[in-house]
Each structure stands twice: as structure tokens, then as C-alpha cells.
Amino acid sequence: MQKKPIIAIDGPVASGKSTVGRMLARKLGFRFLDTGHLYRAVAYLALKLNIAPANARSLIALCHKLQRDKKLEDEGTELISLEREEVSPRLKSEEVSAAASEVAKIPEVRDALVDCQREWAETGGVVMVGRDIGTVIAPDAKWKFYLDASLEERARRRYWELVDRGETPMLETIVSEMKERDRRDEMREAAPLMVASDAMVIDTTEDTVDEVVKILEDIILHGKNSPS
Ligand code: DC
């Protein structure tokens, strides 16, 4: 029997990939995995247990524990039940975001998190979002999208997300931190953020989430061409 397809969505921070991916999965009746949660969960635990990013051996042990203990349910959010602690809201903090991009640079951490991501990919019928889904995790994915948007627009989105959460962010700080995270994700040696050669690049700068979901849906269901 032919396996259900995999839809890979990669892109930089705040390009809209998680929101779009989640909505698309719901529309198609597919499962959804936000692989950033895995790196965030490792970073969160490392901060909590005072494990330095240089301490690869302890980080790997954390990854293995995470994969053993977790029950990755839809949306990857079952990570919230790590040791019965409600960690999900904290995974999005700026502190965890910065630490996640540090741990994601470490090749051994990436290797240690590959298996559970590939398990998801192997079953099919899934939308997976991240940085290396189309290039490393699921290079055979039937559909590969790379969502992008200008730095200013991505910073603006993050700004309003933080405001909605009751924080009082500074736009300039977000821009400079985002630039730094982009640089780390693109320049790292292990599975850097890049456009897969067979991915469709969608610039979401001018589009709403609904519009982007519609573009992807039209391509997947009706074979329409990418707008770019
Ligand atoms: O998508 P996100 O912002 O939640 O990801 C958190 C960090 O994890 C980010 O710095 C990039 C990294 N990441 C990665 O390297 N590979 C993935 N497949 C997903 C996320």
C-alpha cells in the first residue's frame, strides 16, 4: 500500500511555518510535528539542569531521555508532560529560543534527535516543520516548501506575538536577536538552514496566514504552480 505523503515545511524563525503547517495539517487530516519543540525541550531542560551547551555528553543523555519518556502526540506538544511538568508555555520564552539555537548547532544533539523525527516521517500523512526537514529528515518528502519573509516583517510578527503574551518587547532588540539566530541557523555546519534544491520557496511577507495556507493547499490538492 502506498504510504501517505509527507509535507515538509522549512524556513527561518517567524516565517509562519508552524502556524501555516498546523492549519494545513488540520485541513488535510494529517498529523503535525513542530520539530523546533524537540530542540526547545532539550534547551529548556539543559537550562533547568544547568547543563552547558559545551557539555555534549549530558545533552545527548537528555535527548535520549526525552525520546524515551516522551509520547510525541500531535503537534509535538506531548513534550509538555516531561516529568509531569507543564513546560509547554515556557518553551517559547526568549531565553529558551536563544538556548535552542545553541543546542541545535551541536551535531551529536541533532543525531540524537533524528530517530524520533524519522519515525514520524516514515508513517507518512504528516506535516513536519523545522529547518532541515526537506534536506535531512525527509529528503523524499512529496512536497517541500520553504517559507520566507523579510526580516522586518518577521520581527514585527514576533513583536506582536510577545505583546499578545503580555510582554513589553523592543522591536530593535527583536530584529538584532533574530538576525543573530538566522546567522546561527544558516552558518552552522550540521544541517544548516537552507532551501532544499527541490523545495518551493514561498515569500509570506505580504500574505496573511490564511492566504499562505490556501497557496499550499492549491499546490498540493490542485497541482497549481507556486506563485513565485
Ligand atoms: O522553529 P523554532 O524557532 O521553534 O526552532 C527552535 C530552534 O531549533 C531554532 O534555533 C532552530 C532549531 N531547529 C533546528 O535546528 N532544526 C529543526 N528541524 C527545528 C528547529
Image: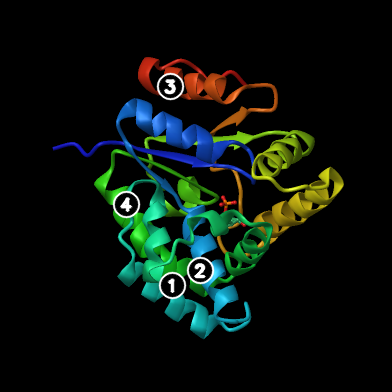
Q: Are marks 4 and 2 in contact (CB under 8 Å)?
A: no
Q: Is residue 66 above or below residue 225?
A: below
**19 with respect to 127 (left or right):** right
> In the rendered image, which quarter contains the N terminus?
top left
User: Where is residue 82 drawn, in percent x and y?
Assistant: 40, 67
Label disc, if present, on residue 52 of the rendered structure: none
Residue 63, disc: 1
| Horizontal arrangement in the rendering, residue 117 relative to residue 203 (left or right) | left
Q: Which mark is residue 217?
A: 3
Of the image marks 4 and 2, the number of the one nearer the N terminus: 2
Check the image and report above or below for 104 versus 24: below
In space, the residues marked 2 and 1 are separated at their CA atoms by 6 Å
Q: Quadrant of residue 44?
A: bottom right
Where the C terminus falls, by quadrant?
top right
Question: Residue at label 4?
Answer: 73
> Which residue reaches farthest left?
1
Badge 2: how crowded within 10 Å, few (<14), some, or many (20+)?
many
- Which mark's residue is nearer the viewer, 3 or 4? 4
The residue at which mark 2 appears reads as 42
- Label 3, label 4: how far apart the Cα atoms are: 24 Å
- Left-right relation of 36 to 124: right
Specify which label sits upstream in the sequence, 1 or 3: 1
Image location of residue 176, percent across then percent down: 82, 51
Closest to the observer, 101 or 169: 169
Res 144 visible = no
- Residue at the spot 61% in from the left edge and 47% down from the top edge: 194
Q: Is mark 1 within 8 Å of ligand 1?
A: no
Report the mark closest to the observer, 4 or 1. 4
Label 3 amino acid?
A: Glu
Task: Give the spatial CA distance, label 2 vs label 3.
Answer: 33 Å
Q: Position of residue 55 (x, y in %)?
A: 58, 84
Residue depicted at 82% across the width and 43% down the height: 171
